[in-house]
Amino acid sequence: MRTDTIAAIATALSDSGIGIIRVSGDEAIPIVNKIYRNKKNREVLLTYESHTIHYGFVVEKDGSLIDEVMVSVMRAPHSYTMEDTVEINCHGGALMMKKILMTAIEAGARLAEPGEFTKRAFLNGRIDLSRAEAVMDVIHAKNQFALKSSIKQLRGSVFEKIKALREKILYEIAFIESALDDPEHISLEGYAEKLSDQVSFVIKELKKLLNSADDGKMLKEGICTVIVGKPNVGKSSLLNLMVGQDRAIVTDIAGTTRDTLEETIYLGDITLNIIDTAGIRNTEDTVEKIGVEKAKTISEDADLILYVMDSSVPLDENDADIMRMIKDKKTILLLNKSDLDEVVDLTAVNELLSSVSEKRGSVYMVSENMEEEEGLHDGNDNIVMVKISAKENDGMDTLVHVIKKMFFHGQISYNDEICITSSRHKEALLEALESMNQVCGSLENQMPEDFYSIDLMSAYASLGKIIGEEVGDDLVNEIFSKFCMGK
Ligand code: GDP
């Protein structure tokens, strides 16, 4: 299949040392040949071997010089797109890159659409859809985890896993279909039991992948975190400390933070999308009241609540209200102002908690030496308390440790476990799981074999969506349109 030749600036369109213009397609080499001259002013690009790089010049139609460049030639199929590709390394000025791109277009190339190079790599069969999506994830990775996991996906981890599951399912479909076609030679006697084992295995694997999706999403996109607490306890100070700049206004007057502020914070491996809310307390002031209502609504959707208390001021009815508000949420209680004399201690907090919520466990203190971590186990209702001083920058390491324990079972692992980070993949896995559960149901009810095969086929198709084998042009176009230019 012949394709037209596309060109785009592959590097950022800002002034920098080097810029790259990428040209790919059947005519890539002849097109760049028209605008490239070597040191001896000769038109020689056609003679260059694949995977070589050469010094020379890009020139106008009349032969006048545009820029001093290095061009690399990659012949099909050994290139990113599997097509003939030329990359022109020029000086990285925005104007210069545009000028060279325009010259390539005048010589016969067409401006590439966003993601069109990667789309060609997918359509030409070099990478599956999960790997194509990983390309974008690598580029947009904002923390170590996202980077590692997207590189792993780029190397085919998701593809391999999905392929193996699909093969298993396909084998069963083929067996059922052959037996139904040729009952004389292939018997389905006792088959239900065997199928049941296979179905259980696939379901277990699908669940494992789905379980990883929640962690994966939070690691990649960040934990939606809300800071709550009464006015003046140090919420803005904490936020500023984490962000590293004076973003929220810190004052001594209670109720200064009236609206909500949002920040993305990178704490090593983890990303927190933090929302700082207005101080929560009963108030008659209307503007403040709106802020308080908003804080309540936001807290409902949060993955994590950071509940800040002032350890130098006794607890009151407002704290009881906050406790009620967050009673179902994963919470870390930050006992702030540890540099001042303590009037609120663990016992006081526990008393308050038991007075407002029967359902909730206890409050556990996690100290700097991190010995007592009973309260940190995943899935219980305990609240973990950490003493901090936002003023003295004390206790932050413990906080990060606690978050990792709560969300990612301790250390964020970079092991070989696959982590699903795409909601598109998660959706397809859920569909596949539903179909496999249907198969289970049919087995239990001893339905005829063709019932199994119908649901197995839909599970097979759902998994195919992840790697791009069962997707229509519309979806392919939509996925690649989210890419950046030149990729
Ligand atoms: P918010 O209303 O909860 O956002 O509280 P702010 O961050 O505005 O802090 C209220 C006051 O407490 C300010 O004067 C801060 O400087 C002070 N503050 C915050 N954190 C600490 C702390 O750890 N120790 C001490 N001593 N004061 C603090």
Image (cartoon, rainbow, N blue to C red):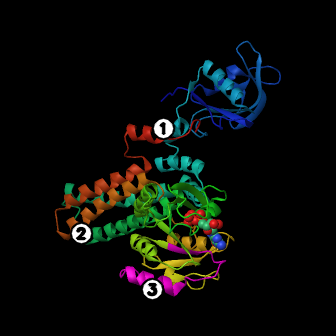
Judged from the image, the secondary structure of the residue bearing numbered disc 2 is helix
Measuring from the top left, give residue 103's x and y in whole percent.
66, 21
Give, as a three-letter code, the residue at label 1.
Ser
Indicate left or right for 180 with 232 as reference: left
In the picture of the structure, the residue carrying the numbered disc 2 is 192
Mark 1 → mark 3, Cα distance in angstroms: 55 Å
Measuring from the top left, give residue 475's x and y in whole percent.
40, 41
Which-is-in-front pick, marks 3 and 2? 3
Specify whether residue 30 is in view. Answer: no
Label 1 near ligand 1 (CB < 8 Å): no
Which residue occupies 41% across, 63% down? 296
The quarter of the picture where residue 173 lies is: bottom left
- Looking at the image, is 298 positioned above or below residue 329? above
Callout 2 crowding tier (Cα within 10 Å): few <14, some 14–19, many ≥20: some
Query: Pointers 1 and 2 in contact (CB under 8 A)?
Result: no
Measuring from the top left, give residue 146's x and y in whole percent.
57, 57
Indicate left or right for 89 with 456 as reference: right
Mark before the other along the chain sequence, 3 or 2: 2
Query: Which span of residues is magenta-colored?
Result: 332-361
Residue placed farthest to the bottom in the image? 347
Mark 1 → mark 2, Cα distance in angstroms: 45 Å
Which-is-in-front pick, marks 1 and 3? 3
Query: Pointers 3 and 2 in contact (CB under 8 A)?
Result: no
Label 3 near ligand 1 (CB < 8 Å): no
Residue 356 shown in magenta: yes
In the picture of the structure, the residue carrying the numbered disc 3 is 351
In the picture of the structure, the residue carrying the numbered disc 1 is 481
